[in-house]
Amino acid sequence: MIINKHIMRTTNEKQVLQQIVNAGPISRSQISRNLSLNKVTVSDIYSQLLHEGLIREVGHGVSTRNGGRKPVMALLNVGYGYVVSINILRQRFSMITSRLDGRSENYASVSTRDVDLTTVLDMIDEKIATTVAESDNRLLGIAFGLDGTIYENQILGASLKGFKNFDLAKYFSDKFQVPVILENLANESAIYERDFAGEGVYRNLISVTIRDQVSAGIVTEGHLYRGHNGEAGNIGTCPLADRYQEKSMQTVNQYVAEGTVLQRIMAYQKLDHVDVNRIRRDYLGHRPELLAILDEFSYYLAKVLGNLSNTFAPDAIIVNAPILELLPEMMDTVRKYVDDMSIIRKAPLLLTKNAKEASLKGGASAIIHKALGLDDLQLTFSNQRSAVLEGVES
């Protein structure tokens, strides 16, 4: 009924499985009531899911007021298999494995500095193969996230050299014989905010991701909005007027992208690497050079967020940026600059609770949806792991 030959086909089957994923432990009678389906239909589907090993029974619930047998309760069997989610950035790739309930494990970050595309692919291949060899469960799917334009599982544009028009999905699907999906980092972050924040908390949201590029993942009425050929959210290439000379224009990436800001910080610190402890120490010590750089970043980021807020009127805008996770106090400055703007709609501006893993976990959710045949249905996962900042991408 799932995975490969057993793809879920009917609406009823999908909805029963969705109930068990989102509301388990749950009984057949409760599923029947929730979906307004007759008990025979639910029992048939339930029995098939149990036979496939996708769900497991976990004891009995409470009997009704009228007495009778206590109902058998069922949960998703998270031991059925696992998925892998990988983010490929300019000088590193990161990876997690996730169970079917969205709980992530085995975070790893691997440097790819001065490494060509072929070697990067070999490194990823080896990392996945090692994971498969060491696991007692089945690999059910792989998700890849990267900066760029992705449409119908193809890379139409990418900031990473060699990835444009390369069929990354087929390359790894052929190697590991599992479904592979591609998504850009901002869309993955938006999926994370939708699926891990709690059901219905954000039906309309924008996740702004600041990495090699500045991009936005847009969720409208619970669904990801991709636009023409997946081009929605490519805000990094939009022009912004210079703060001091309005006739002078630069792109959002040139003002706000992570690399630009970090290069300016390293230049004033006279370092050839990013020292997150030094950045934090200089910020708390009110070093004027650093404060000036961060004020510029905050000003231009506020322009981007204010325009998004006024244009899309989301329930919230969530910002995913390692520099802001390191210095969360900066969000007060960003909010102040947005408040100064003459716009009608000013959505709540929030920091993601998991900058390091948000896009990875969003990718995991996307491939879990695919593996379970529930692409078009809402799944809600608990945010069961908190990330600790290990460093800012450089």
Image (cartoon, rainbow, N blue to C red):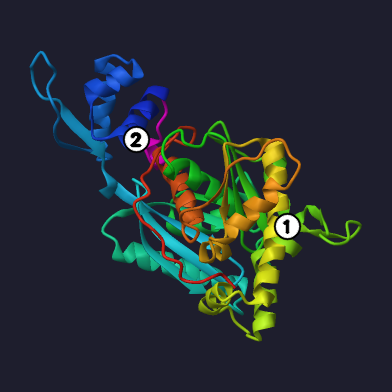
Q: Residue furthest right?
A: 247
Q: Residue type at mark 2? A: Asn
| Label 1, residues with CA under 10 Å away: few <14, some 14-19, many ≥20 | many
Name the residue carrying label 1.
300
Q: Is residue 290 left or right of residue 49?
A: right
Q: Is residue 44 left or right of residue 345?
A: left
Q: Position of residue 185 (x, y in %)?
A: 58, 54
Q: Position of residue 205 (x, y in %)?
A: 57, 40
> Which of the marked residues, 1 or 2, is nearer the chain's N terminus?
2
| Label 2, residues with CA under 10 Å away: few <14, some 14-19, many ≥20 | some
Q: Is residue 165 visible?
A: no
The residue positioned 58% from the left and 72% from the top of the image is 283
Dominant secondary-structure state across the stretch colored magenta: loop
Which one is closest to the eye, mark 1 or mark 2? Answer: 1
Q: Residue type at mark 1? A: Tyr
The residue positioned 29% from the left and 17% from the top of the image is 33
Which residues fall within the magenta stretch?
1-10
Q: Quadrant of residue 271?
A: bottom right
Q: Could you say which is closer to the camera, residue 152 or residue 183?
A: 183
Which element type, helix, strand or loop, lies under badge 1? Answer: helix
Name the residue carrying label 2.
22
Does the magenta portion include 9? Answer: yes
Q: Position of residue 17 (x, y in %)?
A: 34, 32
Q: Could you say which is closer to the camera, residue 187 or residue 283?
A: 283
Does the magenta portion include 329? Answer: no
Q: Is residue 34 left or right of residue 365?
A: left
Location of the C terminus by quadrant is: bottom right
Which element type, helix, strand or loop, lies under badge 2? Answer: helix
The residue positioned 74% from the left and 63% from the top of the image is 255
Q: Is residue 337 visible?
A: yes
Q: Is residue 328 left or right of residue 62?
A: right
**Does 178 appear above or below 321?**
above
